[in-house]
Image (tube, rainbow, N blue to C red):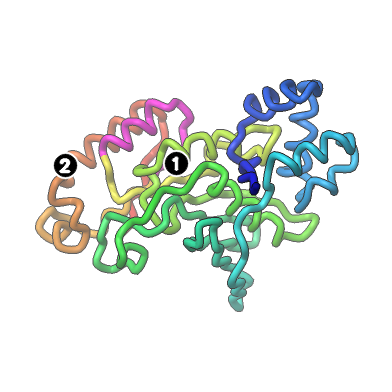
Amino acid sequence: MTTTLQRLLDLDRVGLSDWCAAQGEAAYRADQIRRWVYGKRVNAFDEMHDVPAGLRGKLQEHFTLFESQVVRHQVASDKTEKLLLELADGEHVECVLMREPRRRTVCISTQVGCAMGCVFCASGLNGVKRNLATGELLEQVLRLDRLLAADERITNLVVMGIGEPLANLKALLPALETLNEKGALGLGARRITVSTVGLPDGIRQLAAHGTPYNLAISLHAPNDELRNRIVPVNARIGLQEILRAADEYFAATGRRVTYEY
């Protein structure tokens, strides 16, 4: 009988603390484990040297740390690196590490495919297949983090890969909370940008969440006539409704909205 292992990265700090308690372990063990995963860049539970061997064994029995497989790793002349990951169900997503003089920015995907249908984008050619889970989002970040040298750290995150982020807020928001936490990567909200084609309900939901992440809207056209042609989802939304939602986001968070064109 094969037991399906749970993704460790699906658990937030509270969830991992609860699991440790259920195993008869002290709650602080959760923070120990998270330091190894997010701070010390381990690739296996056995590398967590200050975690008791018995607990490491339980982790191996219940969880997988990295579930995906790297099937392609490309490096550009400017040292940008792109990973093609094969997920547990055989689907694929991409994520990217971008190196600048003072920044190390990672870009992650939120869906397998995309339903927005933008005519200039290859990501949605076959439509959307499914949303990614929280752990699958975090795994992209940690895969890229492990490409960095020991003295390098991720400084910025952009959610601009495959898929529409605001169509998968259920998984995205917990992932961003973990990345924002000091016990994990500790990325400040100012260093996290969520990009959207412009889904007003999603923008309002992101604002209501309370953490003032940067918001970028892929506008690409100055009027509805043109935008309806190149961004088909706009036909049932309209630019004015997107702009209203963006104004509400600024009013709620104090973050100026970026318009991408």
Would you place residue 51 above or below residue 102 in this image? Answer: above
Region in magenta: 200-215
Left or right of 74, for residue 261: left
Amino acid found under the numbered disc labelled 2? Gln
Would you place residue 96 above or below residue 37 in this image? Answer: below
Label 1 residue SS? strand
Q: Which residue is mark 2?
A: 240
Left or right of 251, for residue 71: right
Q: Main secondary structure of the magenta part?
A: helix
The location of residue 200, given as percent across then percent down, is 26, 38
At a point 62% along the width and 43% down the height, the residue shown is 7
Amino acid found under the numbered disc labelled 1? Asn
Label 2 residue SS? helix
Q: Nearer the viewer, residue 167 or 181?
A: 167
Q: Nearer the viewer, residue 159 or 78?
A: 159
Q: Is residue 217 magenta?
A: no
At a point 63% along the width and 32% down the height, the residue shown is 181
Left or right of 8, for residue 175: left
Furthest residue toward front = 1
Residues at marks 2 and 1, CA–CA distance in whole angstroms: 20 Å
At a point 63% along the width and 56% down the height, the residue shown is 104
The location of residue 149, given as percent across then percent down, is 77, 60
Left or right of 145, for residue 259: left
Q: Which residue is mark 1?
A: 214
Q: Are marks 2 and 1 in contact (CB under 8 Å)?
A: no
